[in-house]
Image (cartoon, rainbow, N blue to C red):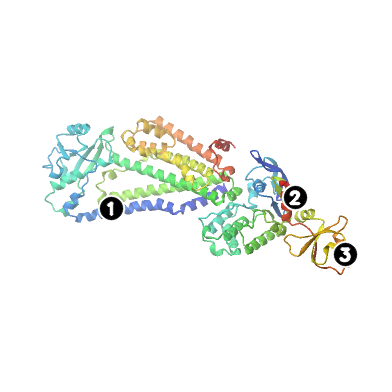
Amino acid sequence: MQKPIQALEISKSYGDFKAVDKLTFEVNAGEIFALLGPNGSGKSTTIRMILDIIRPDEGSIHVFGQPLTDENKAKIGYLPEERGLYKTISVLDMMVYLGKLKGLSNAEAKRRSLDYLERFELADYAKKKVSELSKGMQQKVQFAVTVMHDPQLIIIDEPFSGLDPINRMMIKDLLTEFRGRGGAVVMSTHQMNEVEELADRLLMISKGQQKLYGEVNAIRQQYAKHAIIVEGTGDWNALAGVRSVEDTPNQRGAKLLHLADDVTSDMVLEAIARSNAYIINRFERAVPSLNEIFIRAAGEEAA
Amino acid sequence: MRSIWQVFQHEFWHNFKRGGYLFTTFGIPLLAFVLLLGHNALNANRQEEPLADILQQFNFEGIKKAGIIDPAAVFPTISMPLRGVLLPYADEASAAEAMRRGEIDLFYTISPDYLETGEVTLHLPSLKFTLINTQPIEQLFYTTLASGINPQVLMGLRQSATFETFNLSRAEGNSAVDRGADFIMLYFFTIVFIMSVFVTNGYLLQTVLEEKENRVIEVLIATIHPTQLLAGKILAVSVIGMLQMLVWVIGGLVTLNVALSLPAMQGFSALLNIRVPVERLPLLLAYFVLGYMMFAGLFGTVGALSVSMREGPGYAAFFSIPSVVPFYFLQVFLETPNAALPTALSIFPLTAPISMMMRLNLAAVPIEQLVASLGLLALTAFGSMWLAGRLFRVQTLLSGKLPRLRDLPKLVRS
């Protein structure tokens, strides 16, 4: 099966400003791929190049094994960051129109629209105008429009913005279900906890250049400190192999133990187990959150 | 093609179901029909009014002094209220001379068999609607020949005069045709053109700006090519516009036919002579189609460049206001349809559709002017469509700001 996206050394400039600079990445079927980066880093330009809305100045993009064709466009569901809906026509009419543009027949577009409205508990709003829907409802309709034609690739910019926790969970379930069926998801977001929870791989860009690329877990391990996080009681400074102890930000009661260079976490665990002076409730390697990695990578760039 | 068809279907129904469109397309002809019936009913009621009230309603409008030639002395005298207004002349030559000197605004010739036929001929210095007025003769009739008759009976006689109207300034062999009737047709076609072109092309502008403001545009152009989107939209508003014109023309003809059968309308001599200018229809259609294309392209261009619903119509005014300039010179067109100004306006593409439609109804237009006018209009129409196609691109559609004037050539070339 052809990879949903293969981008090779793509670049795009607007006048003197280089929005994207020699990016190379792939998105596989059956994965959620996160596109990360600070504002103005080139994420939207990258997405628009994938969708052939704009053309790269250099490099090539293959979607399902070839430059994007009209036929393959129908295999993509796209939800841009600045998204909207027709305000003055009914929800159902609008969904049917957008479904038909994606290649569905009138009857099929109507059937699927009603199915999704039912699933999103919006069936009663089918005949209402979009302007009568709350923002959360509109978000759900936008998501339904993105996936109703059963795409093989979903590209979604800030998928969870404006959603309450229940609807957020619903969209997460839909995305993971879609991945489970072999679909590929590209999501651009600032919400790192969502990336940690959902994404299999990521690409982080800053000023149009690649900063991080690969599996989420591998990147986190790569940024892991030579330290462990513990929760419990005891004099952590007295523990053999511990160089220094500090409180962990945002984790009440947890301590970050920095280890000597020649000491491993296994050795520390063994020392704790041998001593009666310590009681531990938590023991784990100090892997940074994606948020920390994001800030660190972006900070390095800024520095 | 499939995408264009989908856009066309959506745009057609979306615009067709607009309250404004339904009202202007179906409501206005219906309203005209209802007003016609209302006018007839009111006129029928007037038969109950006493003569004094009827006489008070006479309105000579622009007529200050009128000549009257009554060779058979049908009217024994000029009655008191009309003395100083109706001036008797011995023959048409002396009356025409007085009219040329400006002593009278117009003159009437009473047919010797008036009592049998009710025939009176109205002579005008030029075509002026306000002078086409039968009421001085009606009043003369009421206050002389019919002065002893019961007012109820009089009302039945109010339609007794049948006028033939001649415009002395255009005596070149077309006296059988009522120019007032032609003028009504001209006015009708021009209004239909303006309403149809600007109302429906306004929808084109509105839908593009809605999609930009609602941010649906990015989803659309990620699915189909911008030119497919533009083509579907233009096709839809064109059909909407044609449909509107068709409804108005059919509605107008039905209303006219009904009007001709109503007693209250028998006094409107212009109406009686109205006929559809079949021989000019192909030319009128050509101007309509090319004019429509030109304005669709221009509205599409403004839609592509504008950012919001507030500013778009403002920019459209740059070409929509000049296009109706010929109306400001209506009098010039009526009096001298082949003079320099009407000729220039009918060749300049923006004003050509309306100007040439007016001229074609008023005079014979030299063939070389028609060719030049149609040629330039066709070039401009295709040029504006091309421009809209060039600017209806991602760069302008997704831009959050209006491009600078000096950037336009670059955008067109890019």
Image-quadrant location for residue A125: bottom right
* Residue toward you, B157 or B404: B404
Residue B186, image x, y percentages: 35, 41
Find the distance from the CA under tag 3 to the CA under tag 1.
Answer: 108 Å
- Residue picked out by circle 1: B39
| Disc 3, SS | helix
Marks 1 and 2 sit apart, C-alpha to C-alpha, by 81 Å
Badge 2: few (under 14), some or many (20 or more) residues near its Cα, within 10 Å? some
Determine which residue is flagged by label 2: A213
B133 to A176, vertically: above or below: above
Is label 3 in contact with label 1 (beta carbons under 8 Å)? no
Q: Amino acid at mark 3?
A: Ala
The spot of residue A95 in percent (x, y) is 56, 56
Can the viewer see residue B410? Answer: yes
Give left or right: position of A231 versus B207.
Answer: right
Judge if badges 3 and 2 mark residues of a common chain: yes
Q: Are marks 1 and 2 in contact (CB under 8 Å)?
A: no
Q: Nearer the viewer, mark 3 or mark 2?
A: 3
B197 sits to left or right of A24: left
Q: Residue at x 26, y 46 (%)?
A: B268
Q: How many marks?
A: 3
Q: Are marks 3 and 2 in contact (CB under 8 Å)?
A: no
Disc 3 target residue? A271
Image spot of residue B227 (x, y percent): 56, 43
Q: Chain of mark 3?
A: A
Amino acid type assigned to the residue bearing label 2 in the image:
Tyr
Q: Which mark is residue B325?
A: none
Quick one: SS at disc 1? helix
Q: Is residue B414 left or right of residue B74?
A: right
- Residue type at mark 1? His
Gap between marks 3 and 2, in whole Å?
37 Å
